[in-house]
Image: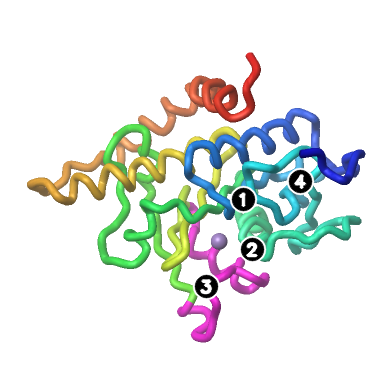
Amino acid sequence: MKSKTSKPRKIAASAALVGDLVAGSRILAKQGVLDGYGHVSARSDKRPEHFILSCSRAPALVTAADLMEHDADSEPVGDPRKGFLERFIHGEIYRTRPEVMAVVHSHSPSVIPFGVTKTKLRPIYHMGSFLWSGAPVWDIRQVRAENDILVRDRPLGAALATALGSCTCVLMRGHGMTVVGESVREAVFRAYYTEMNARLQLQAEGLEGPIQFLSEAEGKGATAANRGTHERPWELWKREALGGK
Ligand code: MN
């Protein structure tokens, strides 16, 4: 279906970044990490204090015309369309983590049990090695006793960013997770493999333990090695999500 807006608004992003954001949204929807909810954003490559995130729309439907520029306080710039209620997740992480270039927020089903129990999500295989730094659990009640679970303003976003700290992934109690990366492709890779790692860890919990997780050194090493291979799954996932060559 064609968007009613025929001409994309001018936003501070290169064509390459726009392409990666559209592909990233559709890939994560296709792979079952995002459903009707969740979002992928990128730090602007033209105005680094701003970030790019689609208007409030299901990730599988996102097109270039849906992308909006947001300022450092997570407010859309010169765009009257409705933004995501939880856009503050993105803005507050970009504020505190200058090296982060992309953020994915999802309600990835297999991670939910790790946000509501004492069992820690840990790297069970090399594809989940970036979890070596730990995946802290953020409990919104610690910031606001009366809440509706949603990260609907800046103070909540800032508290989530503090809980993330220098980690790659933060779990959100009774809600989902947020992962970061140094590119859209890395954040998409991490969102996908956080879900896979959680699924495998849940399976291993039912077998005779203790589970042999990756050590910190193995986790660091595999994270560095994986960084050189992101293009391989990206090419495949993009073709599956968008078609073409
Ligand atoms: Mn959410």
Q: Is mark 3 on a helix, strand or loop?
A: loop
Disc on the earlier residue, 1 or 4: 1
Whether tag 1 and tag 2 are in contact, CB under 8 A, the answer is yes
Q: Which amino acid is tagged 1?
A: His
Q: Name the residue under label 2.
A: 86
- Extreme-top residue of the structure: 245
Q: Distance between the residues labelled 2 and 3?
A: 10 Å
Q: What range of the chain is rendered magenta?
A: 141-166
Tell me whether circle 1 and circle 4 mark residues in contact (CB < 8 Å). Answer: no
As measured in the structure, the alpha-carbon distance from the residue carrying label 1 to the one carrying label 4 is 19 Å
Mark 2 beta carbon near ligand 1 (under 8 Å)? yes
Q: In which quarter of the image is the N terminus?
A: top right
**Mark pair 3, 1: CA separation:** 16 Å
Distance CA(mark 3)–CA(mark 4): 29 Å
Residue sitting nearer the eye, 107 or 4: 4
Q: Position of residue 169 (x, y in %)?
A: 46, 51
Q: Position of residue 24 (x, y in %)?
A: 61, 37
Q: Mark 4 points at which residue?
A: 48
Which dot, 4 or 2, sits closer to the camera? 2
Which mark is on residue 149?
Answer: 3
Q: Quadrant of residue 194?
A: top left
Tag 3 near tag 4, CB within 8 Å: no
The residue nearer to you, when weighing 84 against 12, is 84
- Residue at image x 49%, y 35%? 189
* Image spot of residue 35 (x, y percent): 54, 49
Binning the other alpha carbons within 10 Å of mark 4 as few (below 14), some (14 to 19) or many (20 upward) gives: some
